[in-house]
Image (spheres, rainbow, N blue to C red):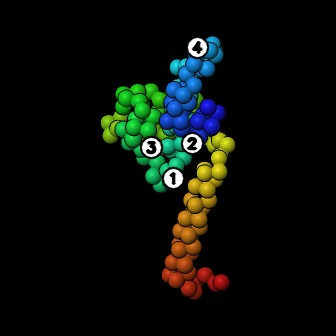
Amino acid sequence: MLQAFNSGNLSLYQEICKAHSNALSAQLALVQNERNLLEKINMLCLMEIIFSRSSENRTIPMRDIAEQTKLPVEDVEYLLMKSLSARLIEGIIDQVDGVVHVSRVKPRVLGIDQVKCLHDRLDTWIGKVDTILLSVEAETPDLVSS
Protein backbone atom coordinates (compact mmCIF):
# COMPACT_ATOMS: atom_id res chain seq x y z
CA MET A 1 0.00 0.00 0.00
CA LEU A 2 2.90 2.30 0.77
CA GLN A 3 4.24 1.82 -2.76
CA ALA A 4 0.85 2.79 -4.19
CA PHE A 5 0.85 6.03 -2.19
CA ASN A 6 4.49 6.81 -2.96
CA SER A 7 3.95 6.38 -6.69
CA GLY A 8 0.48 7.97 -6.72
CA ASN A 9 -0.80 4.80 -8.38
CA LEU A 10 -4.56 4.76 -7.85
CA SER A 11 -5.05 1.47 -9.73
CA LEU A 12 -2.53 -0.31 -7.51
CA TYR A 13 -4.21 1.11 -4.41
CA GLN A 14 -7.61 -0.16 -5.58
CA GLU A 15 -6.16 -3.60 -6.40
CA ILE A 16 -4.61 -3.84 -2.94
CA CYS A 17 -7.89 -2.81 -1.31
CA LYS A 18 -9.78 -5.51 -3.23
CA ALA A 19 -7.18 -8.22 -2.68
CA HIS A 20 -6.83 -7.56 1.04
CA SER A 21 -10.31 -6.29 1.89
CA ASN A 22 -10.72 -8.62 4.88
CA ALA A 23 -7.41 -7.61 6.46
CA LEU A 24 -8.06 -3.92 5.80
CA SER A 25 -11.58 -4.14 7.25
CA ALA A 26 -10.09 -5.48 10.46
CA GLN A 27 -8.05 -2.29 10.90
CA LEU A 28 -10.35 0.25 12.55
CA ALA A 29 -8.10 3.22 11.72
CA LEU A 30 -8.14 2.34 8.02
CA VAL A 31 -11.91 1.88 7.99
CA GLN A 32 -12.50 5.20 9.77
CA ASN A 33 -10.14 7.06 7.43
CA GLU A 34 -11.04 5.35 4.16
CA ARG A 35 -12.35 8.56 2.61
CA ASN A 36 -9.25 10.52 3.69
CA LEU A 37 -6.98 7.84 2.23
CA LEU A 38 -8.83 7.92 -1.08
CA GLU A 39 -8.55 11.72 -1.14
CA LYS A 40 -4.81 11.54 -0.45
CA ILE A 41 -4.15 8.91 -3.12
CA ASN A 42 -6.08 11.06 -5.60
CA MET A 43 -3.94 14.08 -4.68
CA LEU A 44 -0.78 12.01 -5.10
CA CYS A 45 -2.10 10.70 -8.42
CA LEU A 46 -2.64 14.31 -9.53
CA MET A 47 0.92 15.19 -8.53
CA GLU A 48 2.20 12.22 -10.54
CA ILE A 49 0.13 13.27 -13.58
CA ILE A 50 1.72 16.71 -13.41
CA PHE A 51 5.25 15.43 -12.72
CA SER A 52 5.09 13.06 -15.68
CA ARG A 53 4.55 16.00 -18.06
CA SER A 54 7.24 18.35 -19.28
CA SER A 55 7.22 21.89 -17.92
CA GLU A 56 6.08 23.15 -21.34
CA ASN A 57 3.09 20.80 -21.27
CA ARG A 58 1.49 21.62 -17.94
CA THR A 59 -1.88 22.79 -19.22
CA ILE A 60 -3.94 19.74 -18.37
CA PRO A 61 -7.55 19.15 -19.37
CA MET A 62 -9.74 18.31 -16.39
CA ARG A 63 -11.19 15.35 -18.29
CA ASP A 64 -7.65 13.83 -18.46
CA ILE A 65 -7.33 14.20 -14.70
CA ALA A 66 -10.81 12.68 -14.28
CA GLU A 67 -9.83 9.65 -16.37
CA GLN A 68 -6.66 8.96 -14.43
CA THR A 69 -8.10 9.62 -10.97
CA LYS A 70 -11.37 7.85 -11.84
CA LEU A 71 -13.31 10.82 -10.50
CA PRO A 72 -16.28 12.51 -12.14
CA VAL A 73 -15.21 15.69 -13.98
CA GLU A 74 -17.28 17.72 -11.48
CA ASP A 75 -15.11 16.43 -8.61
CA VAL A 76 -11.80 17.24 -10.32
CA GLU A 77 -12.17 20.93 -9.52
CA TYR A 78 -12.52 20.11 -5.81
CA LEU A 79 -9.42 17.90 -6.03
CA LEU A 80 -7.52 20.76 -7.67
CA MET A 81 -8.68 23.30 -5.08
CA LYS A 82 -7.72 20.93 -2.26
CA SER A 83 -4.27 20.39 -3.81
CA LEU A 84 -3.79 24.12 -4.35
CA SER A 85 -4.81 24.94 -0.77
CA ALA A 86 -2.43 22.26 0.58
CA ARG A 87 0.29 23.90 -1.56
CA LEU A 88 1.01 20.61 -3.33
CA ILE A 89 0.66 22.41 -6.65
CA GLU A 90 0.62 25.99 -7.86
CA GLY A 91 -1.43 27.04 -10.82
CA ILE A 92 -4.65 28.45 -12.19
CA ILE A 93 -7.93 26.64 -12.78
CA ASP A 94 -9.65 27.70 -16.00
CA GLN A 95 -13.13 26.33 -15.55
CA VAL A 96 -14.40 27.90 -18.79
CA ASP A 97 -11.91 25.95 -20.93
CA GLY A 98 -11.93 22.99 -18.52
CA VAL A 99 -8.17 23.01 -17.94
CA VAL A 100 -5.69 23.69 -15.19
CA HIS A 101 -2.43 25.55 -15.85
CA VAL A 102 0.14 24.17 -13.38
CA SER A 103 3.26 26.21 -12.77
CA ARG A 104 4.77 24.14 -9.96
CA VAL A 105 4.40 20.80 -8.22
CA LYS A 106 5.77 20.30 -4.72
CA PRO A 107 9.01 18.30 -4.65
CA ARG A 108 8.84 14.86 -3.11
CA VAL A 109 10.91 11.71 -2.81
CA LEU A 110 11.50 10.27 -6.26
CA GLY A 111 11.48 6.60 -7.18
CA ILE A 112 13.84 5.04 -9.71
CA ASP A 113 11.37 5.48 -12.60
CA GLN A 114 10.89 9.14 -11.71
CA VAL A 115 14.66 9.72 -11.53
CA LYS A 116 15.01 8.11 -14.98
CA CYS A 117 12.27 10.39 -16.29
CA LEU A 118 14.05 13.41 -14.79
CA HIS A 119 17.33 12.23 -16.37
CA ASP A 120 15.65 12.04 -19.78
CA ARG A 121 14.19 15.53 -19.35
CA LEU A 122 17.61 16.92 -18.42
CA ASP A 123 19.13 15.29 -21.50
CA THR A 124 16.43 16.90 -23.65
CA TRP A 125 17.02 20.27 -22.01
CA ILE A 126 20.79 20.01 -22.52
CA GLY A 127 20.18 19.24 -26.19
CA LYS A 128 17.97 22.32 -26.54
CA VAL A 129 20.57 24.52 -24.82
CA ASP A 130 23.32 23.18 -27.12
CA THR A 131 21.16 23.90 -30.18
CA ILE A 132 20.48 27.46 -29.01
CA LEU A 133 24.18 27.99 -28.27
CA LEU A 134 25.14 26.84 -31.77
CA SER A 135 22.48 29.10 -33.26
CA VAL A 136 23.69 32.12 -31.29
CA GLU A 137 27.32 31.41 -32.20
CA ALA A 138 26.39 31.10 -35.90
CA GLU A 139 24.42 34.37 -35.87
CA THR A 140 27.03 36.38 -34.00
CA PRO A 141 30.47 35.02 -34.93
CA ASP A 142 32.23 38.32 -34.25
CA LEU A 143 30.74 38.75 -30.78
CA VAL A 144 31.15 35.21 -29.48
CA SER A 145 34.62 33.77 -29.19
CA SER A 146 35.23 30.15 -28.27
Seen from the viewer's position, the closer of residues 43 and 104 is: 43
Q: Which residue is mark 4?
A: 32
Instruction: Give the mark toward the camera: 3 or 4.
Output: 4
Q: Amino acid at mark 3?
A: His
- The Cα–Cα distance between marks 4 and 2, rounded to whole angstroms, is 29 Å
10 Å crowding of disc 1: few (<14), some (14-19), many (20+): few
- Give the mark nearer the N terminus: 3 vs 4: 4
Give the percent coordinates (x, y) of residue 12.
Answer: 53, 36
Q: Secondary structure at mark 3?
A: strand
Residue 80 falls left or right of residue 16: left
Q: Which mark is residue 55?
A: 1
- The Cα–Cα distance between marks 3 and 4, rounded to whole angstroms, is 34 Å
Q: Total number of numbered labels?
A: 4
* Residue 85 seen in the figure: no
Q: Which residue is mark 2?
A: 105
Give the percent coordinates (x, y) of residue 136.
Answer: 53, 77
Give the percent coordinates (x, y) of residue 4.
Answer: 59, 36
Q: Amino acid at mark 1?
A: Ser
Q: Secondary structure at mark 1?
A: helix
- Give the mark nearer the N terminus: 4 vs 2: 4
Q: Farthest residue to the bottom: give it.
A: 142
- Give the mark nearer the N terminus: 1 vs 3: 1
10 Å crowding of disc 2: few (<14), some (14-19), many (20+): some
- The Cα–Cα distance between marks 4 and 1, rounded to whole angstroms, is 38 Å
Residue 37 falls left or right of residue 79: right
Location of the C terminus (image quadrant): bottom right
Q: Amino acid at mark 4?
A: Gln
Could you tell me which residue is drawn at 59 percent across and 82 percent down? 143
Q: Secondary structure at mark 4?
A: helix
- Give the mark nearer the N terminus: 4 vs 1: 4
Give the percent coordinates (x, y) of residue 126.
Answer: 59, 67
